[in-house]
Each structure stands twice: as C-alpha cells, then as structure tokens.
Image (cartoon, helix red, strand yellow):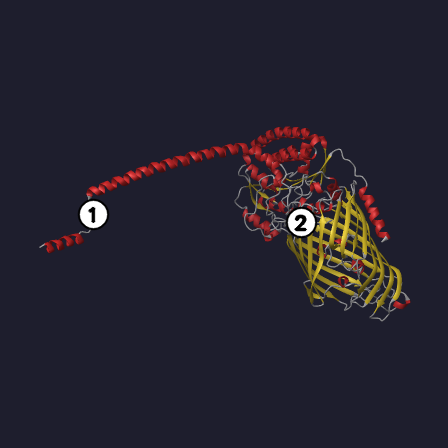
Amino acid sequence: MKKLSLMILTLGVLVASPSFAFAKTNIFACAPEWGALAQEIGGDKVDIYTASNANQDIHHMRAKPSLLAAMRKADLVICSGASLEIGWLPILLNKAGNNQVQEGGIGSVMASDYVPLLDVMQEKADRSMGHVHPEGNPHIHLDPNNILFLSKVIAERLSEIDASNSSAYQSNQVSFENSWTQAIAQWDNEGSHLKGQQVVVYHKSWTYLLNWLGMEAVASLEPKPGIPPNASHLKQVLQDIEGKNVKAILIAPFENEKGAKWLSEKANIPIIKLPFTVGGNAQSTDLKTMFDDTLQRLK
Amino acid sequence: MSKKLLLAASAAVLLNTSPALAASDADLAAIKADIQAMRAAYESKIEQLEQKVETLSAQQDQTAAKIATVEPAAGEQVATQRPATMQRNIKDSSFNPAIGVILNGKYNSFSENEGDVAGFAIGEEGERGTEGLSIDETELNFSASVDDKFRGSATIALAEHGGETEVEIEEVFIATTALPAGIEVKAGRFFSELGYLNSHHTHTDDFADRPLTNRAFLDGNYGDDGIQVSAVLPTPIYTEIGGGIFRGDDNPAGGAEGSDIGAWTAYGRVGGDIGDKTSWRVGLSTLQADDVSRDANEDEVNFSGDSDLYIADARAVYAPTGNNAEQEIIFQGEYFYRDEDGTYEDTGAATGAVDYDDGQSGWYAQSVYKFAPQWRAGARFSQLYAGDVPTGLVGSALDDEGHDPWAATAMVDWTNSEFSRLRAQYSREEVADGQEDNQFTLQYIMSLGAHGAHNY
C-alpha cells in the first residue's frame, strides 16, 4: 500500500501541475481545407494544428501520438464528419480528456452536419457495396458554396469560444464572404462550359465538385468504394466508357496513379491530377488558389 | 256496377306503372325547378367555399413566402449554431450502441506434440493455439456514449477451450469523457495500459499469435477488474501518464481475496512525429501484483507470492510516400523483466512448495511492411530468459535445462477492405530443449458492424 500511495501522490502532482495559459485559440483541423478556412476566419487570433496533409488519405490515418497531444490542447476541432475520420477521431476524443471538443460540444464542428449531403443512402447500406458512408458523402469541401456556409459556422463558433475577439472573427468572415462570393461567380463563369462533361474518378472524392460544376462521373477506378482498383475492374471500366465522350480521369494526390495510367493509355483519355485540398500541389496555397487551380486544370 | 267500376279503377291503378309521374308533369317541372334551385344554392355555396379555400391558400402561400424570405436568415442562425447538447452520441451508423462482431478462424499445424515453454509456467490464454481447424475466438463488442459525461464498452468473447465453449468477459468498462486537464478515468474490467500489445485486442495484431513474452508474462492480455486513471499532459510532444488499482484476479496476478487491492499498475509514455513520414512512441510501465496465488501449466504449477513486472516498449511507423494507406513500415518491440518473490510448486513433478526469489526476462522485436495497399509481410523474433532454478525445482516445469526459449515468425497478409484480412504465418518455435516446432497457420479475421478503430 505504501508504494500505491506514493504512486497516487506522484500522479496527483503531475496532473495538478498548472497547464499553460494559451493566449490564442487552439484549432485542431482534421484536414488542410478546414485548417485553411479556420485561418481565414481566425486570422492572427488562432493557432492552427492541421492533422493531415494533402498526400495522406485521411480515412486511413491512425490515432498517432502527435494527434493526441494536439487534441489535448484544442479549443475547437473542425473535421468533415460523416464517418470520414471514424477510424481515429473517436480514439483521440476518448483519450484526450478534453470535454469541450467532444461531438456536440462547443468546440466541435463536424462540417457535414451543416450542409446538405450527396450520396445519402436511401436504401439499405451493406458492406458488400464497399466502404459506403450511409450518412452521405463526406468530401463536402469541393463545393465552394459549402465552404462559404462553413465560414459562417466557424465564425460563430469562434465568437462563442473566444468572445473577446468576436468582432475580429465576424469582420474576417464578412471580408472572406465578400471575396469568396465574387470568386464563386467567377468560377461559375469559368466552369460553365464544363457542364454535362463526363469524367472517370478514382473514388467518390469528387462528388461535390462535379455536382457543383454540373459534370458527371461515369465510372470509378475502385471496384467498390475503399477497395483499390484491380485489373478485371479496370477492363470493365474500359468497356463501359467505350463510345462515351469521357473528358478525363480525375485523381487526388493521395490516390494511386497506376490504375489511372493504365486506363489513360488504353482509352486515350488524359489524367487530371487535381489538388483536392490546400497543399495538393504547388499552386494551391490557400482555398482560393486551390479552386483557381482546380478550374484551370479542368479547362 | 259500382263493383266493376271499383275493379276497373283498381286495375287501372295497378296497371298504371307510374301513377304519380303520369299524374304530374307539372309536379315534375316543379321538382326540377326545386333541384335546380338547390343546385344553384349549393353551387353558390361551393363557389363561396372554393373562394374561401383559394383565399386561404393564397394567404398560406403568402405566409409561406414570408417564412421563406425570413427563413434563410433565421435558418442560417439556427444552422450555424451547434446542435443542442446531445443526450447520446451515435458515432457509428444508426446503431446505438455501435455493435461489432469479429469473426476469426484459424488452421494451425504443429510439428511437435508439446508446446510447454521451459522455465515458465504458462496460463491458459498463453498456451500454443488449437491444432487443426478452429474458430479461434469470436468477439462481440457493444460501445456507445452513455451520456454527455460517460462512455461504455462491453467486449464478450466466445472461445473454445478443450472442446467446451466458454463465454469470456474480455472488457466491460465505463470511462469518463467530461473530465478536464486531459484526464480519463476508466472503471470495470479492461486490458491495462502495459507496454504496447497488452491494451490491444488480438484481432488487431500483426501476427496470428502473441509473442512469447506476452504469452509468458501477461497470459496473452492482463485484463482485471479495477480503476485506471490516465492523463495526457499539456506538453508539446505527446506525454501520457497513468496508473490503476485492480482486484488482482487475472494472470500474472491471481487469487484475489477480500477487499484487498491485489495489483496496481503505472505507466508513462511519450511520442510524436519525425517529419511527415514517421511517428513514434516509447513507454515504460509496471504491474505489481501482491499476495498472488496463481495456477498455470494446466493447474499443475502454482506460484504464491509477489510478482512485479516491468516493461519497456517502443514503436515507430514510417510511411515511405507519406501516405500510410499506400505503404508503411512498422517497427515494434518490448522488453519485459519480472521479479518474483514467493514459492513455486509443480504438482506434476511433485516438488512441493519451493522458495523462489529471482527475475525472468524476455523481449520481442517485429517489423511489418505494407508494400502495397492490400499486402503486408512481417517478421518477428521473441526470446525468454528464465530465472535460476532453485535445487528444489530441478526437473520441474520451472527448469529451463539451460535452454532459452525462442520463436521466429514470418507472416504475409492480404487485406481486402478495412473489414477483412487473410493471413498465412510460419513460426519456428524452440521453446524447450530438443523441441523444434514448425508451426504453420492460416487465418481469417473479419468484422461485422461497427467500424474498427485505427489505434496507433
């Protein structure tokens, strides 16, 4: 028992040791797009930790120690939700001992809760369909209208968490909204000729982008969502797209190019590697340049 | 005559098919007029009603339009605000609780009949697996947020031991989610934070069986009834400390009695990233079991006394392309040291209770290489070092006869989706002098229901 009391005492001293008072609001962003958006709204009042980069498949990440340390300190967590981060985010939330950022809490923004989702499973979802998200497609950030809406959500949430800087957040949001609305108009204009064009995708990562631009995905390289492309499925895709006027094969930086290259050669369709998120290529340094670059490449 | 007249009149009446109509064309006209009047009245009424309906619906449209014009603003406000504090948090599909079933089947073939580890008394879960085809262990997991302050989880395993189906409570615990300062309190029965592997369920392992160290020192997993407190500290790199008190009823503890605390644990670990491609974690932990009475080697060997275990663990994950979904290499190892002070008795060798005060140790190191998104290959080596044999235990299970047990393992697995994995494994186990066991294993691990966790 003596050893035990010593242990409890040590534990108590370590835990009770004062935590640092952070001047800035700590934001934990699951993905670069949310980190970038939080930066637009938070400006210099926030410190942002971005849990992943554009080269990583966010769904397949692990609950790494570094993420746990960052979650522990977070005042606000911004993620896509809709099961995208289900493999690791719940572990971080369980272990981090941070009540504020639990789902439903003041410090939790699951972006897909705030916008209408596409690909919502109306009928029975079954794993034989591959890795489907019955609640809807979580890759919502590629419709710039969703970004605009989330900017309001984030501004309000930051104002709630850090009331003293509320006016800064609100004014940042207003100026973001002004420039973003203009940008959307410009992109709508630039992208108007894309309407009705057909593409092949690797995964349903592009649903919102295609929906926004009025484009159509006629096939996926993955036989089922979450299952990597294989030879027999690629042959099937080659057959399926025969006679169709397919503009390109779209892939993200974290998606394997092998299958796309094969199809590209056989069907004589170009591969377009889009940035997918901020940092997805050298040009995409923030949200605006990311969409600029995306439309540029789709031309 | 009058009779005739009457008859004629009656006949006329009877034969006349429509006396009234026949009688009254004038009446008919009157009725028609009446009906028309009624219809006119009704029509005007209907018209009035229709008008009313129209005006009402128009009003409604106006109201709706008003609502519609008002709604975007109000809607935005409502929508951008966070959802009201939830009662329950449903994380995985529409199930509450999230329900998961792990299906696990194996084919094992061993070239040696015996698998006793020289110098060690092994618990039931630490024994070599079942030979031949078997449905190893079926695991049922239920987990959910209890409310805004607690979460709960129950994992029940159905396993066969010696031809009998056993229901084992692997983990049944509640944990806090609302404590500040990075603190989590867990209570119930759960796998303690000891080293790396102990807190993980076997279906998440990278090999079909546990290394010799975890089989000998922790009987697979140490999972006892108790309370564990942990805290993630507010440091720039990940730092977590914690400890727990336990009933002391699971190997390597055992024989819990009365209200005593039979075992306690403490651990500390740090971790972080090196660049974008590498993450790492190292830790130290201890399990201190007092007044143990523990039976092992199929109840032939009893240990009574104090058993103190110390573990050092390290793990690093490297993704060559920076994307773990494509390729990654995992390095992992643990070192164990156990200090035991008490008596050992081997009834099989009729040793009687012999005083024992010595240390045993062991280690394993493993690496798994995901060379394609669905394919992994791995290698592992583990070795044990028994304590010095007291004279009274010479020739018993505790006598290693100068042989340090070791096992070398190689495996390859294929992961179709996140929910299914097939594995082939070969092991060379030399766990006792003269034993050269060639082990071949085929395994499937599949999960139904709730999405599995990607633990570090």
Q: What element carries label 2?
A: loop
Q: Is residue B301 above or below residue B199?
A: below
The residue most toward the right is: B391
Q: What residue type is labelled 2?
A: Val
Q: The residue tagged with tag 1: helix, strand or loop?
A: helix
- Residue at x-position 72% and y-position 67%: B162
Point out residue A169 in the picture as x, y percentages from the top left corner: 67, 30
Sequence order check, earlier mark of 2 and 1: 1
- Chain ID for label 2? B
Q: Quadrant of the C terminus of chain A?
A: top right
Residue at the limit of the structure toward the front, as seen here = B2
Q: Which chain does the numbered disc 1 sit on?
A: B
In the image, residue A36 above or below residue B340: above
Mark 2: give few (<14), some (14-19) or many (20+) Cα within 10 Å: some
Q: In which quarter of the image is the N terminus of chain A?
A: bottom right
For the residue pair B162 and A127, the one nearer the viewer reads as: B162
Which of the two residues, B326 or B232, is positioned nearer the viewer here? B232
Q: Can residue A52 be seen in this view?
A: no
Q: In which quarter of the image is residue B163?
A: bottom right
Pinpoint residue B30: horizontal percent, then vertical percent. 23, 40
10 Å neighbourhood of mark 1: few (<14), some, or many (≥20)? few
Please tell me whether mark 2 or mark 1 is closer to you in this view. Answer: 1
Cα separation between marks 2 and 1: 83 Å
Q: Which mark is residue B108?
A: none
Reading the image, the residue beneath label 2 is B146
Residue B99 is situated, as x and y percent measured from the top left of the image, at: 64, 53
Question: Which residue is identified by label 1?
Answer: B20
Front residue of B451/B85: it is B85
Residue A46 left/right relative to B92: right
Give residue B312's position: percent from left, percent from top: 82, 52
Query: Please, is residue A78 above or below residue B128 in the view?
Result: above
Q: What residue type is labelled 1?
A: Ala
